[in-house]
Image: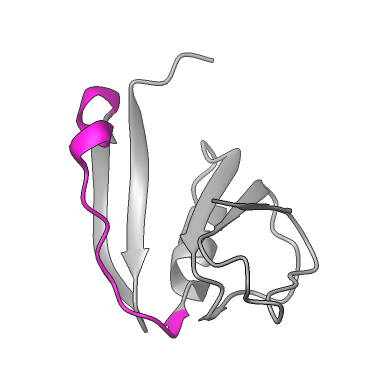
Amino acid sequence: MNVDQVHILQCDIYITKDEFVDLDRLRNFTISGLGASDMSAAMIKFVKDPEVEAAIVITDGDIDYPDQPLPYSVLWMLSRSDYNNFKPEYGHIINI
């Protein structure tokens, strides 16, 4: 698979940014947002895109997300190792 861009959706209680970012810009890309976000809108939007095979969700764990597994792979990148309440029924979790 050859990837030139990534599709980045940022969320608080709704999608706040929706953009395609070239790989060479990722190093300097700024993530914005506050806690208590709802990732559902973004994750459901990706369901409607047949090109999406996987999603990386960067979070502190204080989020809402779809209860049911999605038709693509999910990697949860958890920024807080002390957030024990974050236990999604699908995907893989890594602490960063």
Which residue is at 44% across, 85% downward? 36
Which residue is at 70% across, 51% downward? 71
Name the quadrant containing residue 10. bottom left
Q: Is residue 78 above or below residue 4?
A: below
Most extreme residue toward the right is 89
Q: Is residue 17 left or right of residue 94?
A: left
Residue 95 screen position, x and y as percent: 61, 54
For the N terminus, the quadrant is top right
Q: Is residue 28 magenta?
A: yes
Residue 73 screen position, x and y as percent: 68, 45
Q: Is residue 61 left or right of residue 3?
A: right
Which residue is at 23% across, 23% downward? 24
Name the quadrant containing residue 54. top right
Which residue is at 59% across, 75% downward? 65
Q: Which residues are magenta?
A: 23-37
Residue nearer the viewer, 29 or 72: 29
Most extreme residue toward the top is 2
Residue 91 screen position, x and y as percent: 73, 54
Residue nearer the viewer, 48 or 86: 86
Q: Is residue 84 left or right of residue 29?
A: right
Name the quadrant containing residue 15. bottom left
Residue 28 screen position, x and y as percent: 19, 38
Q: Is residue 24 magenta?
A: yes
Q: Is residue 6 above or below residue 72?
A: above
Q: Tally the marks.
A: 0
